[in-house]
Amino acid sequence: MTSPPLLAELDAATRLALEAGELLRAHLRRGLTVEHKTGADDPVTAADREASDLILRGLHAAFPEDGLLSEEAADSPARLGVERVWIVDPIDGTKEFTTGSPDFAVSIGLAVGGDPVLGVVYAPATDELFAGVVGVGVTKNGEPAGFSDRSEYVVSVSDTEFRRELHRASLPGMAPSGSIALKLARIAAGEADVTFTMSPRSEWDIAAGHALVRASGGEVRRRDGRPIRYNLARPHIEQGLLGGRLDALAWLEEELAARGLPTAHLGLTGEDPAWNVLPEGDRAALAGHPGVFVRHAGGRALALIVVGEGGTVERAEGDAFHLERLTRDVTRALGTLGAAATPTGRLD
């Protein structure tokens, strides 16, 4: 009788997630010193870095030929030349971790050939462990788990996006929460059904959760319908995403389109479907420009930011609310921007 595929990898990732979770609980007991990367919504702590070091050391010791990618560690181009890459977020939901919310998680995913195949997501505050391998299935705290069969879908959404924007939408079934890794894990275990974001995410945010959703028979993809690939040179998904049960995904895409709920697209190029939301003159003028960022819905641009060399904003146009949301997304992606052009309400 053969062993299940990736059993040693799953055991190692599970052990390291539990060890990292205990480290995070110890930091909470001692008290935290919080820094910020790009703003109040983007905190980091010593616990992030220590948990990252613990996980990466353990993975390298167990699988020395594999690549490693973590939000809190220096990246190495060496990972691009290997088939198997571990993708780690030591604390997905650091804001929740620093504010006393239990809605944060350790996230460890394995991608093989660009596909997420294994995921472990551990919520230290509630001692919930989600683990799974594509083709094998998902467990929660060691017990088999899987999608729900409810007919009225639970839509897990960002609490930040809900507070700032989504509370005005009429989309049924919304349940706001923090960590997207934990959202995806709960969907894979049947505690919710589908999720979406308006802002971009990074590979480490979703790799483990994506693997868990796939292990339950679902999918996670970009808002424009294209697949998500992992271990890219720039490990960021440039737009919002959606994921969950396949039937719930089909329903959600129709609902988002009907309500015109927007998404950002960062680093827009002529090869992207969203390029066509730009006015014809902008498509001609911005062709080949490396710093085009747009927020769009319903086939039209709501806000546009063009960033040149050195992070200088060359153009900032569109509706004030959507321009503010897009500016936040661009700042998180690029860091502090240079002196901006005077914003205008025009986008034509």
Image (cartoon, grey):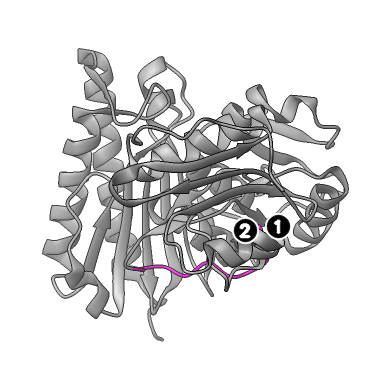
Q: Residue at x 46, y 29 (%)?
A: 126
Which stretch appears magenta? 223-232
Q: Secondary structure at mark 2?
A: helix
| Residue at numbered disc 1 | 279
Which residue is more in the foreground, 322 or 224?
322
Q: Is residue 169 left or right of residue 185?
A: right
Eyeballing the image, is 163 above or below 270? Answer: above
Q: Residue at x 59, y 50 (%)?
A: 240
Does the stretch in magenta take in 231? Answer: yes
The amino acid marked with disc number 1 is Pro
| Residue at numbered disc 2 | 282
Q: Is residue 199 left or right of residue 267?
A: right
Using the rendered view, name the quadrant where residue 10 is placed.
bottom left
Which residue is more in the foreground, 199 or 189?
199
Does the stretch in magenta take in 334? Answer: no
Eyeballing the image, is 105 above or below 278? Answer: above
The amino acid marked with disc number 2 is Asp
The picture places residue 348, in percent across and down from the top left corner, at 72, 48
